[in-house]
Image (cartoon, rainbow, N blue to C red):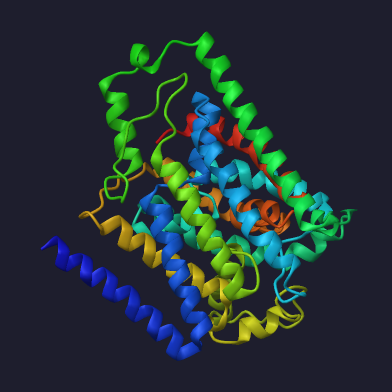
Amino acid sequence: MRWFFRLLLIAGGLAGVLAVAYAAGVRQGLLTLLGIGFGAVLQGARFGFTTGWRDFIERRDPQGLWAQMLLMVLAAAVSLPLIAGSGGELVGAVAPLTISLVLGAFLFGAAMQLADGCGSGTLYKAGAGAPLSFAVLPTFALGSFVGASHQPGWIALGGLPAVDLLAWGWPTALALTVAGCGLVAWLAGRAQSQSAASQPTASQTSTPQDAAQQVMRAGTASFVPAAADAPRGRSRWARRWWLGALLLAALYGLHLIVAGQPWGIVYGIGVWGAKIASALGWSPVGDPFWGVEPHATRLAGPLLADITSVTNLGLLYGALAASRWNGPADFRLPSNRRLIAACVAGLVMGYSSRMAFGCNVGAYLGGIASASLHGWVWFALAFAGSIIGVRIRRRIGS
């Protein structure tokens, strides 16, 4: 009966795409389809930005970082020529180097480790049914909604103007992006080698209970079979990482063509929070963000007309389908202490993402793939914040 259940999942996705296309237009339907693809790949490959960083911080396992750098290079290779040759029809994710970017990225990096997911991670894990992420998503939406209202004030603190490397021509911008990603990948590999020279292998130190916990953490329903942690030292680059990077880069390029802008997460979640607040009696009139264009029009319009919202909705369904593809998903319930900490972290993530012009997708991936220097600043500060977040996470426990 598994084949029949899979047909139902496919039929449900296609029905949703057609419904959105009928209600909001062909473009919105295509974006919903791309969102399903994003969710299926993120969940199916267990491609976590948060997990990749934590694996490196805790165990010097560079596979996640390597995959992210591969994703950046491929996304830039696809998007930079398209943006440069579009005559302004396609835009990149370019933002100034403000004080708010520095503070917001650091806070986001710390909070995403406590919430066990970044922007995309929270969405796809919530779609898959993970209790922790399902609880974090509403607080993320609230934080994004409030943070957007305060964003103009944060930007007013000042900083440096945006640095768009694409102004030097897309070949130069792409070469610099490849060089930067290559440097990060090399440094990560070097750190792994140094750690291997000074630490015993995992086979000498790990216990069967450690391996069992890792398998449970990885998840039981995925297109790519779950595997135990790679040992310290040199190991094969897991297929799920590089395959996930390839597929996400392809989807990223298609999204840019269809939407005219890079893939994003935070704006749509903020719209959800703003619409809920409006339904409860809040008025956007006079709000420095939601009360001005184009945000006022998007807030007043139907949800399915918002580019980021329909992509996010598709992502939720894609993750749900991927998590059930091989049977029922199995998730462990978090402790009350862990749950409270994660929900607070979700609120901080949503708020700080507005300070930093986006999350791991809109600012990190979108910024670097658009050859905007703010993407690299976001990466550096968010990674530093994650080091703090991982330490706090250890104290809180599971």
Q: Is residue 264 left or right of residue 99?
A: left
Residue at x-position 36% and y-position 43%: 334
Q: Is residue 193 left or right of residue 96?
A: left
Q: Is residue 297 left or right of residue 141?
A: right
Residue at x-position 78% and y-position 59%: 95
Say if residue 309 shows up in the picture: yes
From the image, which quarter does the N terminus lie in?
A: bottom left
Residue at x-position 71% and y-position 39%: 179
Residue at x-position 50% and y-position 49%: 245
x and y percentages locating residue 33 in the rendered image = 43, 72
x and y percentages locating residue 186 in the rendered image = 63, 29
Q: Nearer the viewer, residue 39 or 389?
A: 39
* 131 is higher (above) or lower (below) than 289: above
* 237 is higher (above) or lower (below) than 29: above
In this figure, what is the number of numbered marks? 0
Q: Nearer the viewer, residue 24 or 90?
A: 90
Q: Is residue 252 left or right of residue 323?
A: right
* 139 is higher (above) or lower (below) than 301: above
Q: Residue furthest left?
A: 1
Say if residue 372 shows up in the picture: no
Q: Nearer the viewer, residue 354 or 5?
A: 5
x and y percentages locating residue 313 in the rendered image = 45, 70
From the image, which quarter does the C terminus lie in?
A: top left
